[in-house]
Image (cartoon, rainbow, N blue to C red):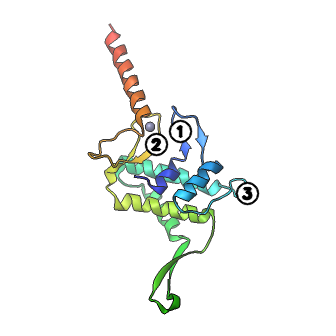
Amino acid sequence: MHVLCLDFINSQWYQTHRPFKELLTNKAWITEFCRRWNLPVWDPETEDPHALFALRDFLFDAAVSFCKDRMLHQHQLDTLNDQLRKAVFYEQVEQPDGNGCQLRICAQRKGMDIVADRVLRSFAELITLYPAKQLKICANEECDWIFYDDSRNHTRKWCDNTCASRVKVRNYRASQRKNAQP
Ligand SMILES: [Zn+2]
């Protein structure tokens, strides 16, 4: 399952098996991310992405807490709710051409504020509307990839096969060393 907030949280590649990459300032990634999620594209050269970095750090920590405890720390919950209260969207009812009513979603601000708002809402939905135990962090301790496990039995442990095989090799070598001890 693709989730907006997870795409965002995972936009910094920490994994040892991948080269370090900062995607929030990568134009090609930004274009694809915004196209996929129908968001306004930001230009990292003219718009300071500082707020997005801070948001990602906050959401990463909150996601790790949630993966471990199935709940947020109180200060994380307070921050999340403070941010949600500042949501930049509001809805308006319109009656175009006298043909009944329709809801129009409007934004009070533009650009990165809308991105931040949508990402926060996505995270709030993820931790409230879906089974908590399916939000996971990759079981490779050197990897910080957060994912939603929608496998049939919800037994997925790794972000991908590379992490799975790395850990298996590491465990195998450790057991060999243990066996070799006198
Ligand atoms: Zn991983």
Q: Can you tell which quarter of the image residue 109 is in? A: bottom right
Quadrant occupied by the C terminus: top left
Q: Is mark 1 in CB contact (under 8 Å) with mark 2?
A: yes
Mark 2: few, some, or many residues within 10 Å (few <14, many ≥20)?
A: many
Q: Secondary structure at mark 1?
A: loop
Residue at (35, 62) in percent of width and height:
129
Mark 1: few, some, or many residues within 10 Å (few <14, many ≥20)?
A: some
Q: Earlier in the sequence, mark 3 or mark 1?
A: 1
Drawn side of residue 74 relative to residue 44, left or right: left
Q: Is mark 3 in CB contact (under 8 Å) with mark 2?
A: no
Q: Which amino acid is tagged 1?
A: Tyr
Look at the numbered disc 3 and say if its residue's Cβ is closer than 8 Å to ligand 1: no
Q: Is 123 or 160 nearer to us in this picture?
A: 160
Q: Secondary structure at mark 2?
A: loop
Q: Earlier in the sequence, mark 3 or mark 2?
A: 3
Q: Is residue 78 visible?
A: no
Drawn side of residue 137 relative to residue 56, left or right: left
Residue at (39, 23) in percent of width and height:
169
Q: Which amino acid is tagged 2?
A: Trp
Look at the numbered disc 2 and say if its residue's Cβ is closer than 8 Å to ligand 1: yes
Drawn side of residue 83 relative to residue 40, left or right: left
Tell me: residue 32, above or below residue 115.
above
Q: Secondary structure at mark 3?
A: loop
Residue bearing the label numbered 2: 145
Q: Is residue 123 visible?
A: yes
Q: Which amino acid is tagged 3?
A: Thr
